Image (cartoon, rainbow, N blue to C red):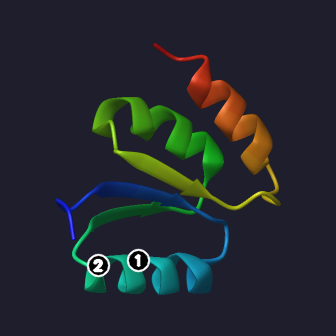
């Protein structure tokens, strides 16, 4: 296995974020979770994770829009 990644998980379901966090941490990665895509948009540019895993069907900003907005950031 390579180096541990800093992974940011965004999902409005607490159960899903807890499961993803547990599995990814067991694999040796550092995981940050957030249940709000709006909050994630503010936090991800500061944390600068190696990758973002996001739910697609979220109530305020869906996963597709979240990805579009993140890609438009420097």
Residue 44 percent across, percent down from the top left: 42, 38
Q: Looking at the image, do the residues carrying marks 1 and 2 touch, with CB atoms under 8 Å apart?
A: yes
Q: What is the number of the mark on residue 21?
A: 1
The quadrant in which residue 6 appears is bottom left
What label does residue 60 carry, if any?
none
Residue 20, percent from left and from top: 49, 78
Q: Position of residue 31 (x, y in %)?
A: 33, 65
Residue at the far top: name it.
Answer: 74
Q: Nearer the viewer, residue 37 or 9?
A: 9
The alpha-carbon separation of the residues under discs 1 and 2 comes to 6 Å
Task: Give me the disc on residue 25.
Answer: 2
* Residue positioned 44% across, 63% down in the render: 33
Q: Is residue 61 visible?
A: no
Q: Is residue 30 above or below residue 13?
A: above
Residue sticking out furthest to the left? 3
Residue lying at the far front of the rendered structure: 1
């Amino acid at each position: 296995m390579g180096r541990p990644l800093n992974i940011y998980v965004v999902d409005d379901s607490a159960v899903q974020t807890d499961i993803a966090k547990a599995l990814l941490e067991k694999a040796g990665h550092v995981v940050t979770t957030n249940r709000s895509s709006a909050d994630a948009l503010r936090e991800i540019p500061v944390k600068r994770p190696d990758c973002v895993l996001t739910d697609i069907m979220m109530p305020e900003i869906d996963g597709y829009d979240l990805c579009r907005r993140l890609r438009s950031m420097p």
